[in-house]
């Protein structure tokens, strides 16, 4: 620590807690001493050390891609992808070096864990390759807790209660539940595959709030939204401001490695009075797990949660608020805990550049039939396995779903936008069980754009595709209810630097 600063009287330096190698970058998790100043992107360099000490190219230095987090226990430095044969560490531009920490590959890793209010531990795992929407045989696995999984004699073991997709629910040992917070924050949870060994883990279980005794109180928010995004800052204002007017009260944003100005945009929305929070979720192709994690976080504050993307907008042709729709669909005594809403996909609508007034006004031509549905769910009614397929969750016994009538509620999905926006979908799909579009896998899937193949090459007729029905319903509503009659501007054009910038 003293070597980093070169001064034995200086404040102790941070250490690298863990390093995770993703397919396109490296995550370096920093741990700071209490009350330390957090480093910024301008303070640090990513250092790549060659295993071959005799090489003249034994060390390379590159600036970080991004730094996430404002917590002394878990700041994440995102470094460019590590060259083959090198290890990654960090250095201060002002001088000093932070030694490497344990390094893990992403394809087999326990990456998140939290202790639920029933004292079970919910563990999120990559690499088990379990089937979607199916319960797996829990007897093949075991939950383990400890500091060093290479020393089996010092591990606590517990029963796997359920296992599905990337989510494992474990019986938490009493000694973990009763440990002081300082000790508990350093204990990691992992999964042992019987006959194969224990998976690497960086997951330290955090505590969720416990239910209050007595009759259940009404939650602070009736309607919330959870989404996962990457580099969608330019669209966020329109999406949040519109949904606030139709009844959304709180937003949970799971940021999946954005490197745009998402933090600045969100701060401007918070300053404008919107209840919006950002949760750093760097784990790639884990949308189902992320939504399950979000459902657990939102459960204490939200009666209902909608799981939609930033290019999807709830729309009632009758002009109903989401409160009205929910009340009508889930009246007392009918055990409705999920409202499934059809998605109608809009095309570029003849445009070749981003519409200046936003997607709702700019895109007015869509496919005739809905492509799929998204759901509004009661998180209290979710099945304990947390199985979901992005579009809907499995519910606990005794609860049921209803399909919203298209004339009452639909989702306008601005899926096929102008090419400069749409081509970003080729970078990576966020869902676990959906093939990336650059892969030669499930090329005929409905998830893909018909006729595009696996390369992001703009078809000459792109601007006229996916146009079967002219639909100006939401456009007309937005212009009527949101436009300032003096300036002829919509509010998302005026907040910050203007729409799309």
Image (cartoon, rainbow, N blue to C red):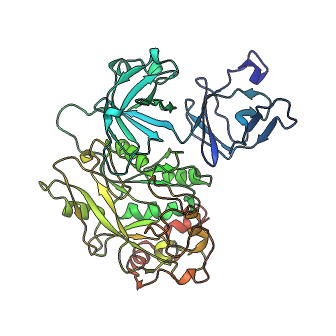
> Residue at left 33%, top 42%?
136
Residue furthest out toward the right: 56
**Front-most of residues 392 and 6:** 392
Q: Looking at this view, name the residue that lies furthest to the left.
A: 333
Examine the rendered structure and indicate whether residue 251 appears above or below residue 372: above
Looking at the image, residue 182 sits to the left or right of residue 12; the answer is left
Q: Quadrant of residue 95?
A: top right
Give residue 207's position: percent from left, percent from top: 38, 30
The answer to which image quadrant residue 351 occupies is bottom right
Question: Where is residue 407, by image quadrant?
Answer: bottom left
- Residue 323 lies, in percent from the top left, at 27, 60
Q: State the quadrant of the C terminus.
A: bottom right
Establish if 396 lies above or below 190: below
User: Percent x, y for residue 356?
Assistant: 57, 74
Q: Which quadrant: the N terminus? A: top right
The answer to whether residue 58 shows anywhere in this view is yes
Q: Is residue 137 above or below residue 438?
A: above
């Amino acid at each position: 620590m003293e070597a980093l600063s070169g001064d034995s009287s200086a404040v102790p330096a941070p250490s690298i807690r863990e390093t995770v190698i993703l397919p396109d970058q490296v995550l370096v998790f920093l741990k700071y001493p209490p009350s330390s100043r957090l480093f910024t992107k301008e303070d640090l360099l990513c250092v790549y050390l060659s295993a071959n000490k005799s090489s003249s190219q034994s060390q390379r230095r590159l600036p970080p891609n991004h730094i996430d987090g404002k917590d002394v226990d878990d700041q994440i430095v995102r470094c460019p992808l590590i060259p083959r044969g090198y290890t990654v560490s960090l250095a201060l531009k002002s001088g000093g070096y932070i030694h490497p920490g344990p390094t893990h590959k992403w394809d087999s890793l326990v990456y998140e864990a939290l202790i639920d209010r029933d004292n079970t531990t919910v563990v999120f795992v990559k690499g088990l390759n379990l089937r979607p929407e199916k319960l797996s045989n829990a007897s093949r696995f075991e939950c383990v807790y400890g500091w060093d999984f290479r020393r089996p004699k010092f591990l606590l073991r517990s029963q796997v209660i359920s296992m599905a997709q990337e989510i494992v629910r474990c019986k938490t040992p009493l000694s973990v539940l009763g440990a002081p917070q300082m000790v508990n924050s350093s204990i990691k949870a992992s999964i042992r595959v019987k006959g194969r060994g224990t998976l690497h883990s960086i997951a330290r279980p955090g505590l969720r709030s416990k239910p209050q005794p007595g009759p259940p109180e009404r939650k602070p928010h009736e309607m919330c939204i959870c989404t996962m995004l990457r580099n969608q800052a330019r669209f966020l204002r329109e999406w949040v401001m519109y949904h606030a007017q139709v009844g959304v009260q709180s937003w949970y944003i799971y940021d999946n490695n954005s490197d745009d100005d998402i933090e600045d945009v969100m701060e401007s929305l918070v300053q404008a009075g919107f209840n919006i929070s950002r949760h750093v979720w760097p784990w790639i192709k884990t949308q189902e797990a992320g939504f399950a994690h979000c459902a657990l976080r939102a459960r204490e504050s939200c009666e209902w949660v909608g799981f939609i993307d930033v290019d999807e907008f709830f729309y009632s042709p009758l002009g109903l608020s989401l409160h009205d729709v929910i009340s009508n669909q889930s009246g007392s005594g009918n055990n409705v805990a999920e409202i499934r809403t059809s998605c109608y996909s809009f095309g570029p609508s003849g445009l070749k550049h981003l519409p200046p007034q936003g997607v709702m006004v700019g895109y007015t031509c869509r496919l005739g039939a809905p492509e799929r549905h998204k759901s509004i769910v009661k998180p209290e009614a979710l099945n304990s396995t947390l199985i979901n397929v992005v579009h809907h969750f499995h519910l606990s016994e005794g609860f049921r779903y209803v399909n919203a009538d298209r004339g009452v509620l639909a989702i306008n999905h601005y899926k096929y936008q102008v090419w400069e926006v749409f081509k970003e979908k080729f970078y990576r799909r966020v869902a676990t069980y959906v093939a990336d579009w650059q892969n030669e896998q499930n090329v005929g899937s409905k998830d893909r754009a018909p006729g595009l193949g696996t390369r992001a090459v703009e078809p000459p007729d792109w601007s006229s595709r996916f146009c079967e029905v002219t639909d100006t319903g939401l456009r007309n509503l937005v212009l009527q209810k949101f436009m300032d009659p003096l300036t002829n501007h919509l509010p998302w054009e005026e907040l910050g630097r203007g729409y799309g910038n």
